[in-house]
Amino acid sequence: MKALKHILIILFLINVSSCKEKSTSEKNVISETETVTEIQNDIERIEPPNWWVDFKNQNLQLLVKHPNIGNATPTMSYAGVTLKKVHKSDSPNYLFLDLDISESAKAGIFNIRFKREDGSELIQTYTLKSREKSAEDYVGFDSSDAIYLITPDRFANANPKNDEVAGLLQQGTDRTDGYARHGGDLQGITNHLDYIEDLGFTAIWPCPVLINDMPQGSYHGYAMTNFYKVDPRFGTLEDYRTLADDLRSRDMKLIMDQVANHCGLQHWWMKDLPFKDWVNYQEHYEKNKDNWDWKTTKTSSHRRTTNQDPYASKKDYSEMADGWFVATMPDLNQRNPFMANYIIQNSIWWIETLGLGGIRQDTYPYPDKTFMSHWAGAIMNEYPNFTIVGEEWSYNPLLIGYWQEGHNNTDKYDSNLKSTMDFAMQKQIVEALNEDESWDKGLVKIYEGLSNDFAYTSPKDIMAFLDNHDKSRVYTEFKGDLTNSKMALSYLLVLPRIPQIYYGTEILMEDFDNPGDHGLIRTDFPGGWQGDTVNAFSGEGLTADQKEMQSYLKTILNYRKTSEAIHDGKTMHFAPQDGVYVLARMSENETIVHIINKNENPIELEVSRFEELGLKGKLLKNIVSEAQLKWDTTLMLNEKGSLILTTKF
């Protein structure tokens, strides 16, 4: 991977650098281990809460939070582990400890002793674990996968006992309010993995489930108040691990939704920030926090093109990158080396703890982009077969391509990011099927949209979708047209992309009453709550159209699981003519032909135009209906819709 050598050097410097006047001298290597006879947890907080041996990067930086801990002197004695430096912060209630975990270090526990000025001592027992599998075995999602995106609060409530947790700022549930909590949880996802697997999905991406102890809007998960704690209304860390383990047993992957850009305003550290530059516009916040609202917040300009614009002013870039996303989400300053380490280590901690199959990184263009390259590079250095997808909400393919690893950017920037999100293709598909056909409207939109793949380093590693937790539902986008919805989804599933489908798309969930409203987009999945009159898991109460779509997607998704042509085949398409667009995916042993036909009346397709596909005289099968046809002179298209034909029997 390009630039990894430089990244490792930078990460090493970050790990060991700080103001020298706040650091102790380097310690000697410990060859003997102090015996731990009792687990002790005198310290208020230490993060990461544990670590592992046998990483390539042997550096670990511990955040220690405790009243007046800054005046204490830490010591430790554990074979193979060296306390290299101790950093004080601007707040007296923090220390940052730099440890070196050598190749000789073994899994086990050891005490970190903090001797205070009055002679008293605090003891914190720390754990080093063995890694459960080799780094190469952390295999990320790719174009052979199909991803099911879930808003956990709205999918299924398996444990009503955790709907309300004493002491949290937002209490209760109200399923009539789109912005209240509804009670869905991790166990609800785990309990319905049979349904998800049977549909044909091979990976799930739940929106964040870490704690959002916020007074309102806590259900969505993107305002985290502790980066190491599962929200108890979703369950426990063990529930999260159970979900991950169950997925692995099915050869399915868990993708974690992470946020490096911001935290929630009620994050525990906002009451006592360790450094004067821990968050962006920190001085402004601290002066105005007693009257904090959207009017006083210095929010981001959201001019994300300043990341690429060769003419962008530093002022414009700063206002985009440093501004807060919203008033309730403080913008993290990744230029602070301790914050940088914190975020990188947190991501690695979750990969190891859950055995993740990927990370989706929220609001990717907003954090410091140099740091984001270091962040992704650090992860990929440890896990060479892993996958990270970054959210770049742009309809411009040039911006999407900029963020993909290895892209030939004029500013020489390399993101180390394997996958980006294809908002551009989403827009083109919707317009192509909604518009009447003309020279520059209709199917030509997706033809030219796919032609833009020349701008991407690796198109098949880009994540494509039709709807998600922030955009209107597919069925709404297509104005309740079942046929157009099916054509769009079938096209998505044969593209050289990684497809993602939002929960409920398979049963035509919609937001007609208020298109684009987040609370409505994230409607409860029917059957996920006791007493629901409709149950999409069993099919009870679904309409004929809903059952048709569910069956349609199930057929294509399950076929897709074993189609080498779709996973990794060559792509060829033909310019739309007479309301018909043909795309093919070809591997050594299989050819897939996808045909979109927008004609309401029967039309005869002359197949001689597609001679390059080498199909003349061959027998093909419709993967949905299983009907067979011979690719000869003409092909009769009797009705509007799409066909997926295969040479594989």
Image (cartoon, rainbow, N blue to C red):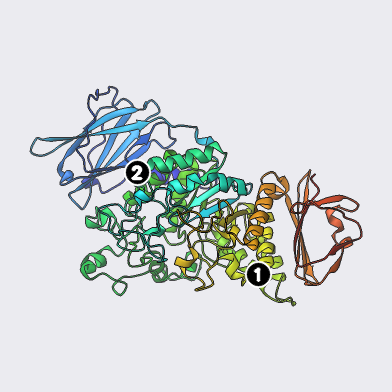
Direction from residue 53 to residue 462 in the image, left or right: right
Query: Residue drawn at (73%, 48%), measured in percent from left and top?
Result: 565
The vertical placement of 16 against 101, above or below, is below
Q: Give how far across and how far down residue 499 sits, in percent.
A: 61, 54
Secondary structure under badge 2? helix
**Amino acid type of the residue tagged 1 in the rendering:** Asp
Residue hosting label 2: 15
First in sequence: mark 2 vs mark 1? 2
Q: Is residue 231 among what the camera can see?
A: no
Q: Residues within 10 Å of mark 1 (few under 14, many from 20)?
A: few
In this picture, is 566 found above or below 28? below
Percent coordinates x, y for residue 359 in the rendering? 48, 49
Q: Nearer the viewer, residue 634 or 75?
A: 634
Q: CA distance from mark 2 to mark 1?
A: 55 Å
Which quarter of the picture shows residue 449? bottom right
Q: Residue at x 54, y 72 (%)?
A: 512
Q: Amino acid at mark 2?
A: Asn
Residue holding disc 1: 481
Q: Name the residue: 72% across, 70% down.
A: 444
In-image side of 294 versus 453 (left or right): left
Please report contact status of discs 2 and 1: CB closer than 8 Å, yes or no. no
Q: Nearer the viewer, mark 2 or mark 1?
A: 1
Residue 589 appears in view: yes
Q: Residue at x 43, y 40 (%)?
A: 241
Measured as percent of width and height from the top left, residue 287 is found at: 21, 68
Quadrant for the C terminus, please: top right
